Amino acid sequence: MSLKMSHDKPTPLYLHIGTEKGCPRCGVDEESINHLLFLCLPSRKIWALSAIPSLENIFPRNDLFYNFDFFLRRDKQFGIEEDIFGIFPWIIWYIWKSRNWFIFESVIEPPQETLDFAKQGAKVWSQVIIQLFSPF
């Protein structure tokens, strides 16, 4: 694992097992977490297919912290409904799973399929939460 220094603290922005630092899906020279989740072509396609607006120069950017800040704090600033942003953790999780599926199983998952899995995960999670917190 390699760490990039940020503000004098090590932060895991670049995580790699092995010697290859490039992105296995698109071939860019160095795969960062931000690249994997937001900038890699398969990831960009997933975000474009989602209800979360991809706004030029606003989202996604080449800054992991900004991209998460966009989801966690800027929804109201851009007039985006909360329920639209509720799926973002699921999209991130399934982008990560799709990448690992490609690396470890050599399976290329279509972006729409990845998004569908994320939507299904969010739906199941919502149903479980409702059941847990609803009165008997």
Image (cartoon, rainbow, N blue to C red):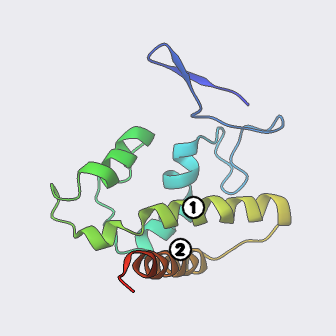
Q: Residues at badges 2 and 1 in contact (C-beta under 8 Å)?
A: yes
Q: Position of residue 115 (x, y in %)?
A: 52, 75
Q: Residue at x 51, y 17 (%)?
A: 9
Quick one: 42 or 6, which is closer to the camera?
Answer: 6
Residue receiving disc 1 = 93
Q: Residues within 10 Å of mark 2 (few under 14, many from 20)?
A: many
Q: Residue at x 78, y 71 (%)?
A: 107
Quick one: 48 or 78, which is closer to the camera?
Answer: 78
Q: Quadrant of the N terminus?
A: top right
Q: Quadrant of the C terminus?
A: bottom left
Q: Residues within 10 Å of mark 1 (few under 14, many from 20)?
A: some
Q: Residue furthest bottom?
A: 136
Q: Position of residue 131 (x, y in %)?
A: 44, 82
- For residue 63, say whether it is visible: no
Quick one: 57 or 83, which is closer to the camera?
Answer: 83
Q: Residue at x 33, y 54 (%)?
A: 71
CA distance for labels 2 and 1: 8 Å
Q: Residue at x 44, y 17 (%)?
A: 7
Left or right side of 2 for 78: left
Callout 1 secondary element: helix
Q: Quadrant of residue 33?
A: top right
Callout 2 secondary element: helix
Residue receiving disc 2 = 118
* 32 relative to 136, above or below: above
Under mark 2, the amino acid is: Ala
Under mark 1, the amino acid is: Trp
